[in-house]
Amino acid sequence: AQKITQTQPGMFVQEKEAVTLDCTYDTSDPSYGLFWYKQPSSGEMIFLIYQGSYDQQNATEGRYSLNFQKARKSANLVISASQLGDSAMYFCAMRELYNQGGKLIFGQGTELSVKP
Amino acid sequence: GAGVSQSPSNKVTEKGKDVELRCDPISGHTALYWYRQRLGQGLEFLIYFQGNSAPDKSGLPSDRFSAERTGESVSTLTIQRTQQEDSAVYLCASSLTSGSNEQFFGPGTRLTVL
């Protein structure tokens, strides 16, 4: 079974608008972390935001926020006020802290295109 | 400060040859990870090292793949008798410890097996 599912292969958003990238996960580990990474066409992996499974509040980092719904096992990324430079692949990832150590399990990614 | 570096940036090899990929983690980072990214796909975990503990090799796809790390420094990923399906970008990441929230990625090595 897929541990991380990103159902949107591609998304378009108008510049300056907000966009939500979906991510659902599956784990039986009580302690886990959820991550979002950005991968521009250059190929580098850029860490955006982290949410721990016990965190009470949704994580925010500048224009990025993580809509964490634990009961639904979803960790959607919200990008506010989209910019042209936000065009990239976005990957959701999970780390299961008790069973799997530090390794990250990645979804298949969503390609975001920001239109001027 | 210096980030994670990887060499070579590109490698083209013939089917059946062995290749070695190198990763230099951030100084002081005890955890080091190797991932593989096939074209248009997400990253697949291969192996990780944490300090002097036994590495987690659970992601290695076959016994043609192996990796070593000397202490808390350089790591090499070796692929023996390369196959065309080994063509991918191989990414290395390091973090302060395996419990750290952020893994810092290198630029990757693009391997093409002809």
Image (cartoon, rainbow, N blue to C red):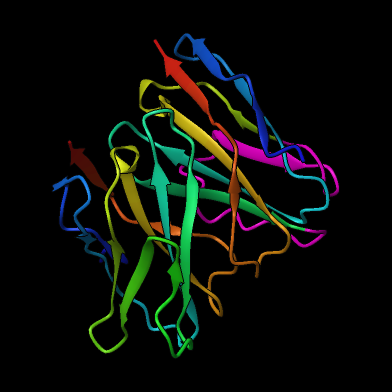
The C terminus of chain A: image quadrant: top left
Answer above or below: position of B12 versus A26: above
Point out residue B58 in the picture as x, y percentages from the top left corner.
Answer: 53, 56
Answer above or below: position of B108 versus A47: above
**Within the image, what quadrant is residue B108 found in?**
top right
Instruction: Tell me which residue sits at (56%, 80%) in the image.
Output: A98
Q: Which of these two is toward me, A98 or B95?
A: B95
Q: Which of these two is toward me, A64 or B59?
A: A64
Instruction: Tell me which residue sits at (28%, 80%) in the image.
Output: A73
Answer above or below: position of B112 versus B24: above
**Within the image, what quadrant is residue A27 found in?**
bottom left
Point out residue A79 in the picture as x, y percentages from the top left corner.
Answer: 30, 59
* Numbered-mark total: 0
The answer to whether residue A2 is left or right of residue B31 is left
The answer to whether residue A13 is left or right of residue A88 is left
Instruction: Tell me which residue sits at (65%, 67%) in the image.
Output: B100
State the residue lying farthest toward the right: B71
Residue A63 belongs to magenta span: no
Point out residue B109 in the picture as x, y percentages from the top left corner.
Answer: 54, 26
Magenta portion: prevailing SS class: loop
Start-end of magenta stretch: B51-75
Instruction: Tell me which residue sits at (48%, 78%) in the image.
Output: A32
Q: Which of these two is toward me, B58 or B105?
A: B105
The N terminus of chain A: image quadrant: bottom left
The answer to whether residue B71 is left or right of residue A3 is right
Point out residue A69 in the picture as x, y percentages from the top left corner.
Answer: 28, 83
